[in-house]
Amino acid sequence: MLQPALTEPLRRWDPEQIGGYTLIGRLGAGAMGQVYLGLSAAGRLVAVKTIKIELAEEPDFRTRFGQEVAAARRVSGAFTAAVVAADPEADVPWLATAYVPAPALSTLVRTCGPLPVPAVRWLGAGCAEALESIHGTGLVHRDLKPSNVLVAPDGPRVIDFGVARAAERIQLTVTRGAVGTPAYMAPEQARDTRQATVASDVFSLGATMLFAATGHAPYQGETVMDLLVRLATEPPDLTGLPPELAEVIRPCLERDPRKRPTSAAVLAHLAPGISLEQAGQGLGSSALPGPALALIAEYRRDPKPAREGGNAGPRPEPGPGDDATFGSQPAPSAPHEAPAPSRGPRLASGRARTRRRRVHLAIWSAAAAAVLLGAGLMVVSVAALVIDVEVGMFGFQDSWAAPYVTSTLYWEIVGAVVLLIAAGALAWPAIAARSWRGR
């Protein structure tokens, strides 16, 4: 059975510490930043999620992020990963949540196949209860999907609530109005993220349960645009959905949000089908199939980063319906390739990396300006010599017009050179910044 690596070693440019947490490995990466496995001073494991500096510099991002984090810290449901610390004002904003040693539902289904009906009911009930906790604080998740549901033996954990809205402005620019993952997004949310409500989360809950039962999303397409068109014009694809689950999943996927059940109604429908054994200390052990329990057990071992040359097992190839966004998938790595040897100590923070880039940029800009200035002076000197020669050739040297012709030609060339130098000086920082951004 293919198993993904649980954690990966820190790279030489990764920070060694964020806030009061020592980083011991990487858990994932996404559109908004990196996710690290951290260790508190008391030995508690946490998932530390960082925000890309270019996103953090967006207007009002830190304010929105701080507001969402404050609301998320009030969520205390049994089926959510609690927010334990955050710093929206740090050079690199970050959020720490309780670490749940469990695979995402997307990984579990890709590795072990669709879940049986009892397991889907057990999973759906836990997610519905998590939404009740989230909605009770005034939050709307906006990005519920299989990769944001961790499948632990004592129940699922919904993660990444309180993040999607903070990224609203960035995602509006990228997706032209949609914040979320299109394959699991409600139609009204796809049209305008400002229309996302608790009913939108119920749609995503139904889509996530459909994936757990069938292995596919309700809408699929070769491109995001193709998927959005189908979302707006076609009914959901319920191929392979067991009839016992259709009566609860189908209403969740209603196009009209007013016709969808509430998360409380979904929970009430699913709860009677969960046995006392599933609801007790054994929890998912009687509902989940053997391969799924084996994969979960692998995640519950002491998490240690994969070592150079170690055998963490090949990683399953992402399928066409993957929904990778912030913190939802394992961090990318080249297969059969050991990490490059360290060439120096890791930088301690995003500010240090930014300062280093600025110093390099200043050095390169100064060097470029010096080269342009030297070239300009050389051009001016040559131009002066050419002017003297041409004035002599055309017989202007003894004419009353000689000073006028010489001065006019000379200053026209000087002006052109000055404009050239100014244009180069203005353009170079932008060119250099663009080249350094990816380093």
Image (spheres, rainbow, N blue to C red):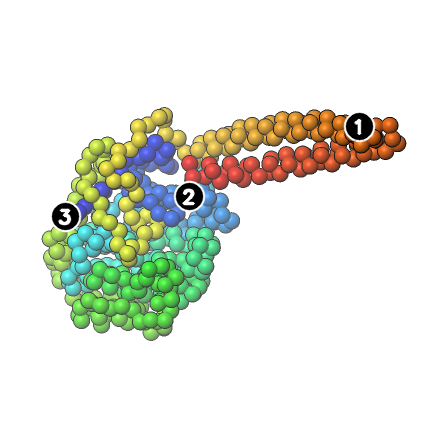
Q: Quadrant of residue 23?
A: top left
**Mark 1 Cα shell of 10 Å, populated few (<14), some (14-19), many (≥20):** few
* Number of marks drawn: 3
- Between the C-alphas of marks 1 and 3, the distance is 88 Å
Q: Position of residue 309 (x, y in %)?
A: 21, 32
**What amino acid is found at the position of numbered circle 1 in the picture?**
Gly
Residue for badge 2:
52
The mark found on residue 1 in the picture is: 3
Local crowd size for mark 2, using a 10 Å CA cut-off: few (<14), some (14–19), many (≥20)? some
* Residue type at tag 2: Lys
Name the residue located 56 percent from the left edge and 28 percent from the top edge: 367
Q: Residue at x 46, y 36 (%)?
A: 436
Q: Which image quadrant is residue 40 in?
A: top left
**Residue 205 at x, y = what percent?**
29, 62
Q: Residue at x 33, y 60 (%)?
A: 222
Q: Which quarter shows the C terminus?
A: top left
Q: Nearer the viewer, mark 3 or mark 2?
A: 3
The circle on residue 132 is: none
Task: Give the residue at mark 1.
Answer: 392
Q: Is residue 10 above or below residue 78?
A: above
Are dots 3 and 2 in contact, CB under 8 Å?
no
Whether residue 200 is visible: no
Question: Which of the two discs, 2 and 1, sits closer to the camera?
Answer: 1
Looking at the rendered image, the disc whose residue lies closer to the viewer, 1 or 3, is 1
The one nearer the camera, 34 or 405, is: 405
The residue at 34%/51% (across/down) is 325
The one nearer the camera, 222 or 92, is 222
